[in-house]
Amino acid sequence: MRHEIQRPGGGTITLDDDVLDRGELAESPSLPRRCYAATHVVLRSSYAEVPHSIDAPGTSEEIAEHIDWDATLAIRGRADGLGIGVAEAMDTAQRFELGWVGARELLRRTGELGLSNGFVGGASSDHRESIESVDDLADAILEQVVFVAEQGGLPIILPQPWMPANGMGEEDFVRLYTRIADGAPTEILIHWLGEAFHPGMRGYFPGNSVDRILDHDPAKIRGIKLSLLDAEYERSMRARIGPRGQIILTGDDYNFARLMEGESQESRPLQLLDSRPLAGGAFSHALLGILGATVRPASLALQRLGRGDVEGFRALMEPCEELGRAIFEPPVQRYKSGIAFLAWLNGQQDNPMLANHEENARDADHYLRVAELASRAGVLEDAGLAARRLEAYLAGQSA
């Protein structure tokens, strides 16, 4: 059913919840790409009274008091039921705002869910008050690597702003990551976050450091999540490391459809990753924040791809990519606002709030465009509910 919403400045947008063939959407499907949805954290409505802001942020302990655990975990279970794993305690979960206080609890609770498609968990150094050296940083990260593994997760090494902030060069980066790999009790992934997502990432992996790190122990360092918004670089790295069994998990929220489809549908078997098999080839797997919003159409698209229906895959995934471009428009780091807003429109949470009220960083026009594109992509499950909530939001903006 279609619903029209009046724009404050004139004109209308249309919301429709009949885009997907729901009968085609299988439960617990086996997908041809390893996918992880970087899911967000839901806050209770009590947080509305907390005067945190981007310019005057709260402490991680203050924010953690307002987490809606039931809604937060339900979002993770929903992705798992559609064949998509979870990327936990990463940037989409507002790791920089929640710190280790919230991240540790997220990891513990997600581990207890026993997700069929597994989860990767961000390992960092934010449980330490200070870092004195590269070796100190490596040891701190290893402590979290062990914790993630103990919860049943596959550790992914989060980018460390301490490195560029302290002028660390190529040899320092190689020392950090190889020390972590050698000391880890399990296989690991690494994450390269571009400057667009976090200004402290300027100059990350200097020189030839990332290639040297990936070459160090491919059986231990199983792959890399690339969040650089550079599709050609991703393809070139995939071609280099893929033949030896390492994978690219695309974090490119602008170009993920084409990168996941790849240049060929031919695949080769790889070793187990996180105790589960996956195929390798001229395509990327995925670890994406946008998957948290597009889990239904993305799952259906990948089911089609698994049946050899490439055109059917594109028909569903390209509108998801268009939505991703809107949600991740500059300033890119505010993308979580759109993801939480869509979860609210879909009835998955009682409000669209984020830590430090980051939802206020986007305006009504942005949210209207996101809602309309979400409708076209098949994200909305109940257009009537979405329309009512969107009208209530607009009424609040004009009050």
Image (cartoon, helix red, strand yellow):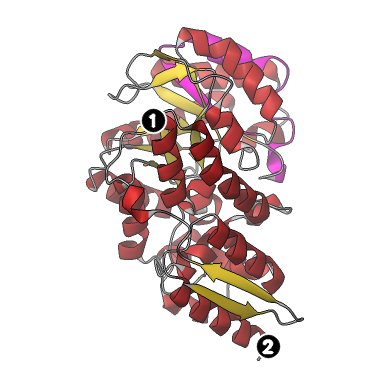
Q: Which residue is mark 2?
A: 398
Q: Is residue 209 magenta?
A: yes
- Residue 162 % position (x, y): 63, 36
> What amino acid is labelled 1 in the image?
Arg
On the rendered structure, is 218 left or right of 239? left
- Counting residues from the start of the chain, the first of labels 1 and 2 encountered is 1
| Nearer to us: label 1 or label 2 | 1
Highlighted magenta segment, given as a residue range: 199-227
| Residue 55 shows in the view | no
Q: CA distance from mark 1 to mark 2?
A: 48 Å
Residue 43 appears in the figure: yes
Q: Tell which residue pokes out farthest to the right in this image.
A: 9
Specify whether 330 is left or right of 379. Answer: right
Residue pointed to by mark 1: 307
Give the vertical position of 111 relative to 343 (above or below). Answer: above
- In this orientation, which residue lies closer to the viewer: 261 or 348? 261
Image quadrant in which you'd find residue 64:
bottom left
Where residue 3 sits in the image (x, y, percent)? 54, 76
Q: Quadrant of residue 199?
A: top right
Residue 332 placed where, x, y %? Answer: 68, 50
x and y, in percent, of residue 352 in the image = 51, 70
Question: Residue 95 bears which disc, if any?
Answer: none
The local secondary structure at tag 1 comes to loop
Residue at 32% x, 18% y is: 272
* Quadrant, the C terminus: bottom right
Instruction: Look at 65% across and 83% down and name the residue there.
Output: 397
Which kind of residue does numbered mark 2 sit on?
A: Ser
The residue sitting at 55% across, 12% down in the picture is 241
Q: How many marks?
A: 2
